[in-house]
Image (tube, rainbow, N blue to C red):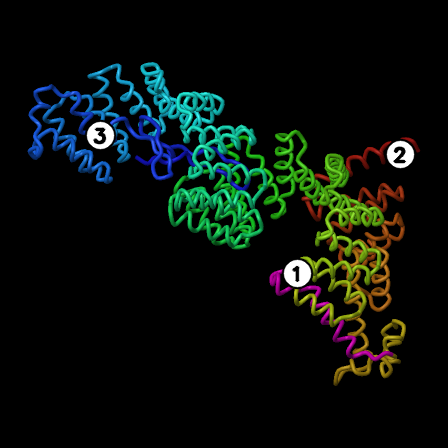
């Protein structure tokens, strides 16, 4: 009678909790059949003889060479034949007829119960075992059979009670009872107790191969890989054709990262045990981890063909498809796992990760919420949800999740520290960001991502030299880090080193050509070098990757516009200095002749062109400001204002730049000019108020803050506090004078 072995559940090289109900074995002595594990009941080999042994002598003497069809001997012989051929329904019917002839036969009841167990009708088997125990309360086989049936129904506590009774009633030949009780402990994750029972089974029967296998699984779950290896090795030393033993060795090799040896062991398991979903699944894992994902996928497909309900194989295939970038197919596999087991937290977690890569961030957050609600130790779910929050711009929520994950891991999670540092940067908390990356580097001085993040923090603080130094370290540790090359390119761009920036962007694109921002940044570098053709090509490539990226659309438009202007200007025109509209009118034949449209006077045309150039300079100033190159932004704004009177925004931006440089008087003048053009801008009033405050013109600052507050009540939180402080200060100053 074949029995399912306890299924080893592992993902990659680590185990997940063992599944239940994968075993179970019928009660009785352990023997080997056709190279596979089989536990047979004590009456399987000769049911008719065993059942007749308990009959009255008169009945036995009535038997003839060819028994009648309605005789007890015929029914028992028929039941035995049907059971051996797997025709369990017919066997049970024959036993029922035999029981009509002899209703109180313990042996027939027991044989019928075993058959119902083999048919997986565990509740019906328990009824027959109960009947046996009523007739014979000291029948160890009945207690063992009922215990194994309860275990098959996942009632391991009651199962252990019955199996313990069987051991007490028959302590000498209790190897199968010890083995089955050990399996109950194994399914309950009580591995030490399980190992003790498997040791007892082996002590009573040194060739109890399933006990060696289950003992190895228990030791493996405790992390005692060498001891587990020894247990599996002992089983194949006893019988080289024991497929489960080779399967166990494959699992240990898999955990140790010895993937070629794992593949060899799983292949032997398939050779000796025939097509079995577990063996193909294990070999699929080994192929996946050894750099042969296609062969791994083939083995996972075979495992699922053999057992379409094999949840772990669906999960493993889903994970592999995710690694191969086939996320929609991966999602199908994970959905299948959840259909079979809706409460599978690992499936919900992995489904959330796949949804995240598909861009369905809200759905990913929902999956992580479910995992976190059900598992208080779901550190990975917290970190993934933190990444989701970051991607949708909810940085404070992200910081909460990363902090919770760090608290559970004792502050030692490098990835959480780096991710939280990124979130701190996004809300402008650079000191906290720097503290996190310094902690990460202290924990692991060779963590490339930590140095990359520290470089970004230094860049945010305007310390480009430190940023470049940290980026160099990051690239030494991880020479294939495309984001580090991109970041170094951005820093060089800030410093005005366009050619160095382009070299770094080239490397980033070589390593990863699917990132729109790499092409965007290189396009900006070419744009600043006035190489509009290459700038446009890069912007267009970025748009192919991210068609809805508004920033790329804007920069592409600017590059095309400048390119069209360059086509209209010859080298002599480009050499002329920027002129006022009046001077442009006088020199239009030299510089702007081809830009004056028909029916347009030279002066009108010059004014229109000057306005276009003014807007172009202002647009470039915004770009420089965004890149942190304030000197270049100031030059562009000065040029824009010389060419033509710009809009309020240009004066406002130049006021901000003056304020950042501590030039408060010039800042106040520019903010005032901006307010003349647009007196309804609350931010400009705030900027001028700050400049007045720095110039100790407190009453003027007070009035500007009040004006800002009237225009934008949402400023109340920050502005009211400043107004209150200014009122108190002005009052004290007036009292002093």
Q: Which residue is mark 3?
A: 46
**Are circles 2 and 3 on residues that touch, CB within 8 Å?**
no
Dot 3, crowdedness within 10 Å: few (<14), some or many (≥20)?
A: few
Is 489 on the left or on the right of 574, as rendered? Answer: left
Precedes in sequence: disc 2 or disc 3: 3
First in residue order: circle 1 vs circle 2:
1
- Position of 611 with respect to 578 (left or right) is left
Label 2, secondary structure: give it: helix
Mark 2 neighbour density, 10 Å: few (under 14) some (14–19) many (20 or more): few
**What stretch of residues is rendered in magenta?**
543-571
Q: Residue at x 9, y 26 (%)?
A: 101
Residue 596 in the image, given as x and y percentages of width and height: 78, 81
Q: Quadrant of residue 60?
A: top left
On screen, 234 above or below 653?
above
Res 677 visible: no
Question: Residue 189's x, y, as percent?
Answer: 47, 27
Which-is-in-front pick, marks 1 and 3?
3
Element under disc 3 = loop
The Cα atoms of the two marked residues, 2 and 3, are separated by 112 Å
Around disc 1, counting alpha carbons within 10 Å, would you say few (fewer than 14), some (14 to 19), or many (20 or more)? some
Pick whichever of labels 1 and 3 is earlier in the sequence: 3
Whether residue 661 is visible here, answered yes or no, is yes
Q: Main secondary structure of the magenta part?
A: helix
Q: Nearer the viewer, residue 542 or 142?
A: 142
Q: Point out which mark residue 513 bears.
A: 1
Q: Which residue is mark 2?
A: 733
Q: Nearer the viewer, mark 2 or mark 3?
A: 3
């Amino acid at each position: 009678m074949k029995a399912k072995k306890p299924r080893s559940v592992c993902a990659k090289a680590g185990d997940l909790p063992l599944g239940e109900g994968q075993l179970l074995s019928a009660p009785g002595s352990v023997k080997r059949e056709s190279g596979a594990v089989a536990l047979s009941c004590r009456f399987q080999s000769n049911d008719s003889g065993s059942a007749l042994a308990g009959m009255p002598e008169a009945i036995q003497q009535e038997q003839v060479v060819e028994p009648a069809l309605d005789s007890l001997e015929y029914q028992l012989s028929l039941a035995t034949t049907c059971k051996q051929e797997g025709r369990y329904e017919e066997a049970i019917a024959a036993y029922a007829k035999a029981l009509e002839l002899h209703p109180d036969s313990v042996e027939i009841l027991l044989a019928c119960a075993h058959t119902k167990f083999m048919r997986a009708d565990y509740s019906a088997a328990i009824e027959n075992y109960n009947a046996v125990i009523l007739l014979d309360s000291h029948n160890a086989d009945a207690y063992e059979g009922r215990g194994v049936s309860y275990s098959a129904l996942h009632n391991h506590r009651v199962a252990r009670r019955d199996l313990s009774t069987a051991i007490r009633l028959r302590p000498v030949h209790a190897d199968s009872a010890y083995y089955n009780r050990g399996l109950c402990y194994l399914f309950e994750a009580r591995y030490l107790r399980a190992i003790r029972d498997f040791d007892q089974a082996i002590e009573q029967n040194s060739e109890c191969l399933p006990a060696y296998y289950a003992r190895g699984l228990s030791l493996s779950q405790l992390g005692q890989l060498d001891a587990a290896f020894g247990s599996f090795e002992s089983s194949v030393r006893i019988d080289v054709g024991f497929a489960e033993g080779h399967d166990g060795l494959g699992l240990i090799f898999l955990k140790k990262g010895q993937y070629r040896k794992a593949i060899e062991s799983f292949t032997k398991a398939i050779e000796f045990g025939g097509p079995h979903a577990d063996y193909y699944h294990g070999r699929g894992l080994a192929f996946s981890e050894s750099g042969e994902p296609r062969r791994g996928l083939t083995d996972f497909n075979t495992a699922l063909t053999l057992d379409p309900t094999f949840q772990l194989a669906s999960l493993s295939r889903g994970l592999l498809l995710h690694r191969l970038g086939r996320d929609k197919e991966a999602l199908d596999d994970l959905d299948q796992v959840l259909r079979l087991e809706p409460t599978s937290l690992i499936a919900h977690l992995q489904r959330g990760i796949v949804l995240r890569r598909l861009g369905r961030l809200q759905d990913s957050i929902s999956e992580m919420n479910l995992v976190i609600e059900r598992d208080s130790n779901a550190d990975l779910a917290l970190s993934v949800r933190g990444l989701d929050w970051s991607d949708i711009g909810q940085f404070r929520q992200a910081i909460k999740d990363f902090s919770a994950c760090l608290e559970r891991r004792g502050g030692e999670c490098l990835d959480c520290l780096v991710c939280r540092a990124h979130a701190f940067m996004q809300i402008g908390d650079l000191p906290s960001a720097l503290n996190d990356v310094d902690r990460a580097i202290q924990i692991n001085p060779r963590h490339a991502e930590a140095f990359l993040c520290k470089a970004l923090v230094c860049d945010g603080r305007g310390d480009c030299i430190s940023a470049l130094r940290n980026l160099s370290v990051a690239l030494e540790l991880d020479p294939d880090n495309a984001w580090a090359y991109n970041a170094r390119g951005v820093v060089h761009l800030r410093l005005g080193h366009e050619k160095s920036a382009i070299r770094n962007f080239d490397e980033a694109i070589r390593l990863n050509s699917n990132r729109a921002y790499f092409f965007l940044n290189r396009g900006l570098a070419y744009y600043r070098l006035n190489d509009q053709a290459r700038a446009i090509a890069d912007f267009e490539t970025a748009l192919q990757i991210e068609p809805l990226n508004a920033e790329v659309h804007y920069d592409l438009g600017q590059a095309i516009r400048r390119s069209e202007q360059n086509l209209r200007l010859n080298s002599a025109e480009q050499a002329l200095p920027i002129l006022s509209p009046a001077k442009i009118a006088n020199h239009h034949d030299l510089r702007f002749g081809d830009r004056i449209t028909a029916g347009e006077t030279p002066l009108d045309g010059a004014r229109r062109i000057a306005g276009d150039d003014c807007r172009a300079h202002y647009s470039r100033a915004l770009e420089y400001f965004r890149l942190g190159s304030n000197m270049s932004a100031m030059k562009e704004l000065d040029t824009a204002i010389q060419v033509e009177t710009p809009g309020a925004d240009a004066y406002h931006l130049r006021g901000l730049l003056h304020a950042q440089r501590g030039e408060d008087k010039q800042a106040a003048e520019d903010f005032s000019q901006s307010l003349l053009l647009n007196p309804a801008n609350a931010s400009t009033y705030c900027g001028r108020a700050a400049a007045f405050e720095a110039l100790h013109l407190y009453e003027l600052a007070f009035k500007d803050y009040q004006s800002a507050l009237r225009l934008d009540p949402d400023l109340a939180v920050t502005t009211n506090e400043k107004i209150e402080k200014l009122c108190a200060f002005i009052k004290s100053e007036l009292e002093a004078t």
